[in-house]
Amino acid sequence: MAAAMVHFLAPTRQLGREPVAKSFESHPCLFLKRVSAFLPLLLFQPVCKVTQRQLNITVKKKESHWWERLTKQEKRPLFLAPDFDRWLDESDAELELKAKEEERINKISIKNRTPKDPFRHLKRGYLFMYNLVQFLGFSWIFVNMTVRLFILGKDSFSDTFHMSGDMMYFCQMFALMEIVNALIGLVKAPLAPVCIQIFGRNFILFVVLGSVEEMQSKAVVFFIFYIWSTVEIIRYPFYLLSSIDVEWKILTWLRYTIWMPLYPLGMLAEAVAVIQAIPIFNSTGKFSFTINYPLTITVPFSVFLQLHLIFLFLAPFILFRHLYKQRQRRLGPKKRKMH
């Protein structure tokens, strides 16, 4: 045998009483001197284990080459047996080496057959810059609102939109690129959850808040902006690092956990904004329109706001299910393969 490790098995019933076996475990060299014809070729760092049936001794060779036999006598002692579960002869070794070589060649051939994307570096650069810009934009909003909150307290609520609205406009308009990225396969993301989040936010930002000044001074604007920016200053750095194959475990955990408290709070704040906007749109008649055929009917825009309220309570079933599956896939227990 040419394996680097040698495994001996000695039945405890052949060694005698258990204390005798225990003595061999404490001094395995005594046992090896008794049975080994190649004692100088062994490195004396044996590992011994005594069970009710046998004494297992594993020793390491100085040189990995074939031995004709293990013991001084040509006839094997009754109390000694090689561990045939780990036995390896020359033919087995050759087959094992051949199998490993074939596996290595197959891996190389599969790798060579896989077409390399000539634009992969360009795609990575684009994703890196996109996530960096979004991270900087939402960080500016978050820091600006936090500083003003500490300085002005509740008084900062009323002018949140005027101080951070333009940057939020930019970030949410730029976020439309995430739909494009999913459509062209630049990122592996299901289209439905991406559209639900982006179109839902943009409806709140551009229509509910941005189109009527009465809504821009409401305190709910502060909570909407603050929750959105808190989520994104975690999400975008995660994607930024992922684009360059870097993982920060704390950030990964936050990315797949922070949504659980913040997304429901965000949707609740959006629902409050829609409820507050309904009477304003009714009184101003903004975006209302008239249908003249077959009957003359005026459709107030508040009807669409009420439909959006229903959407706010139905959309989470799709969005949260997707986020929960993502969390289980990244942070859940790994399934063991059954052999």
Image (spheres, rainbow, N blue to C red):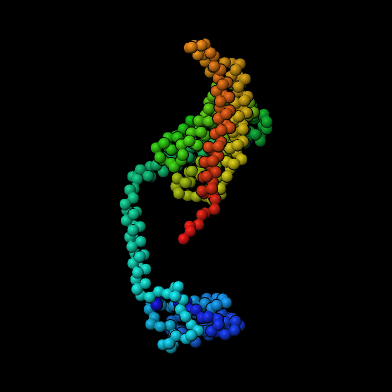
Q: Is residue 286 above or below residue 332?
A: above
**Whether residue 229 can be seen here:** no
* Res. 224 image quadrant: top right
- In this rendered view, identify the residue nearer to me: 137 or 294: 294
In the rendered view, tell whether residue 306 sits above or below residue 66.
Answer: above
Q: Can the viewer see residue 16 in this picture? A: yes
Q: Is residue 86 left or right of residue 101?
A: right
Q: Quadrant of residue 3?
A: bottom left
Q: In this picture, is 216 found above or below 53?
A: above
- In the rendered view, does 25 fall on the left or right side of 8? right
Residue 231 rendering spot, x and y as whole percentages? 56, 39
Q: Considering the image in quadrants, where does the N terminus appear? A: bottom left
Total numbered labels? 0
Image coordinates for residue 123, horizontal then vertical, percent: 39, 42
Q: Quadrant of residue 230?
A: top right
Q: Position of residue 175 (x, y in %)?
A: 48, 34
| Nearest the eye: 107 or 161 | 107
Which residue does the image show at 46% across and 78% down from the upper left? Answer: 82
Residue at point 48%, 43% (across, down): 240
Task: Name the residue at 45% across, 49% down.
Answer: 245
Residue depicted at x 35% and y 75%: 90
- The furthest residue to the bottom: 73
Residue 252 location (% of width, % of height)? 53, 47
Residue sitting nearer the eye, 300 or 297: 297
